[in-house]
Image (cartoon, rainbow, N blue to C red):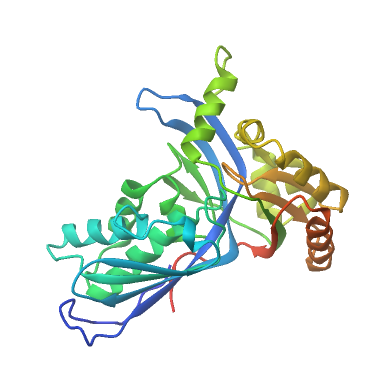
Amino acid sequence: MTGTTAKTDPTDPTAASVTVRVPAKVNVQLAVGAARADGFHDLANVFLAVGLYDEVTATPADTLRITAEGHDVDRIPLDRTNLAARAAELLAARHGIEPNVHLHITKDIPVAGGMAGGSADAAGALLACDALWSTGASRDELLDICAELGSDVPFSLVGGAALGRGRGELLTPLPVGGTFHWVFAVADGGLSTPAVYGEFDRLTAGTDVPEPEAAPELLAALEAGDATALAAALTNDLQPAALSLCPPLTATLEAGTAAGALAALVSGSGPTTAFLVKDAEAAGRVAQDLLASGTCRQVRVAEAPAVGATVL
């Protein structure tokens, strides 16, 4: 996350706009506990930011409005239910101003794909509005607003790699010793995160769900920058639920593995599938074979870790 020297009057229609770039994420470990009384689940969620980005541009306006361009924008809300709009409203309310801003989202992160695209937009909007309005919000205040917006939003702000505890919002930064290469296969349609957690609850009903803990071998592989060791440690407790709701994802996982990926898993709640590969050359081969397999509608190649929300 970076700062800005922008100083603008939120009521000045001639003030310059602020653009923030914010990354997608992949969960290299997603350990899920049993449902809590509040309906959430305790997590050990190892986030890794990857180099696929949305951009959010904030411009002074006479009211709050959202526009968007890019991949699958017909599938995101352009009203105040959008997390980006809620981010602007929360920040404005804390600082006693009206949330009069035009937020324009340029989408490149898959929509409803388990890669925190909506959370990224919220983090991007928050940082952009903070800069545009010169609210001077501290890092802790921004993270507090992020946690109010959603479990993945704080990580979208900070990027890099982190262990998320609680419902994912309590972050501990993690060291990463190298660059990891990924291929992402974008599925037709999306999966609702609440629906996937509901299916997890159904599949685990009557069983003893262990307390979620980060795997030491996975953390060591991240710190060492060892792709082979990381591949052996990747886990996602939501994967059985995602596959239950979207069985064709199994064929996508198999196609990526057959193409030479070191490991394959569903990204977060899905339906995007993630393939860890050895290097950039392998990423190109796996991406080509995945697209040729007909098991996905789009493939994306990215490196990790990536920086968090950044003012451009």
> Residue 259 or 187: which is nearer the viewer?
187
In the picture, measured across the screen, residue 295 lies left or right of residue 127, that is right
For the N terminus, the image quarter is: bottom left
- The residue lying furthest to the top in this view is 206
- The residue lying furthest to the front in this view is 74
Q: Is residue 157 above or below residue 45?
A: below
- Image coordinates of residue 80 in percent, x first then y, are 29, 56
Q: Residue at horizontal 76%, vertical 49%?
A: 295
Instruction: Say which quarter of the image contains residue 238.
Output: top right
Residue 131 visible at all? yes
> Residue 66 or 109: which is nearer the viewer?
66
For the C terminus, the image quarter is: bottom left
- Image coordinates of residue 11 in percent, x first then y, are 15, 78
- The residue lying furthest to the left in this view is 96
Q: Residue at horizontal 45%, vertical 49%?
A: 152
- The residue lying furthest to the bottom in this view is 14
Q: Residue at horizontal 67%, vertical 65%?
A: 303
- Image coordinates of residue 208 in percent, x first then y, are 57, 15
- Image coordinates of residue 231 in percent, x first then y, are 76, 47
Question: How many numbered markers are drawn?
Answer: 0
Q: Is residue 297 above or below residue 220?
A: below
Q: Is residue 38 above or below residue 310?
A: above
> Residue 308 or 260: which is nearer the viewer?
260
Residue 160 visible at all? no
Q: Residue at horizontal 71%, vertical 58%?
A: 182
In the picture, measured across the screen, residue 239 lies left or right of residue 67, that is right
